[in-house]
Image (spheres, rainbow, N blue to C red):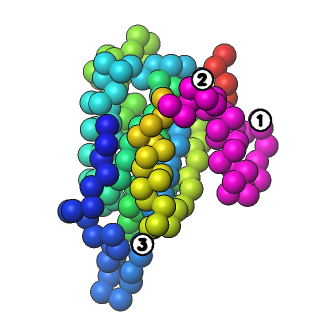
Amino acid sequence: MNFLSFSNFPLSLMVMSDTFSQMYCHLVFAVQGRYSLISHEWETQLYKYITSIVQNNGHKLLAIGGMPDHIHLFIGYNIVQSIPELVREVKRDSASWINNQRFVSGRFSWQRGYGVFSYSRSQIQAVANYINHQEKHHSKQSFLDEYKKTLDHFDVIYEDKYLFKPVE
């Protein structure tokens, strides 16, 4: 599903008359236990639901995609809301929606934690393409290996014990 559209979105968000920002954030988070619970049958509905959460919070969803065990969001970020607050709301509301729709047997939840990475305007298309072609990327490399590669690329210091837990 391709959400990248610039026609109705100012690429710089004006917060106050004298405050300007232009931030693009790539968010990544996983299903609890990294179980493959996101089904192709309802993932488009999930993506639309998450899009509405992001937009209702004043951000612009540029791309959304993932695999059955994790999801990527790429947003034009509005600085009036903290990233932890946005992620908390997206996870809480989308998990509640999945459970209310009874898309999975048992209780659906997202794993604690997330990754967030910033990109420049010149990188928008490349990041959106990456997110929109997740199946292709993960046919060559596991999610955890790719995530570690991203952390290393951004020089993020981490300990393996705090990374997304592997499928049990």
- What residue sits right under mark 3 in the picture? 22
Q: Residues within 10 Å of mark 1 (few under 14, many from 20)?
A: few
**Marks 3 and 2 close (CB-CB < 8 Å):** no
Q: Is residue 78 above or below residue 62?
A: below
Q: Is residue 82 above or below residue 36?
A: below
Say if residue 91 shows up in the picture.
no
Looking at the rendered structure, the kind of residue marked 1 is Lys
Seen at 47% across and 53% down, the residue is: 126
Looking at the rendered structure, the kind of residue marked 3 is Gln
Of tags 3 and 2, the one toward the viewer is: 3
x%, y% of residue 166? Answer: 67, 25
- What residue sits right under mark 1 in the picture? 161
Inter-mark Cα distance, 1 to 3:
33 Å
Inter-mark Cα distance, 2 to 1:
14 Å
Of tags 1 and 3, the one toward the viewer is: 3
x%, y% of residue 161? Answer: 77, 35
Quarter that holds the N terminus = top left
Seen at 57% across and 44% down, the residue is: 114
Q: Nearer the viewer, residue 7 or 38?
A: 7
Magenta extent: 136-164
x%, y% of residue 155? Answer: 73, 57
Seen at 32% across and 57% down, the residue is: 60
Q: Residues within 10 Å of mark 3 (few under 14, many from 20)?
A: some
Upstream in the sequence, badge 2 or badge 1? 2
Q: Determine the residue located farthest toward the top in the rendered image.
A: 105
Secondary element at tag 3? loop
Q: How many marks?
A: 3
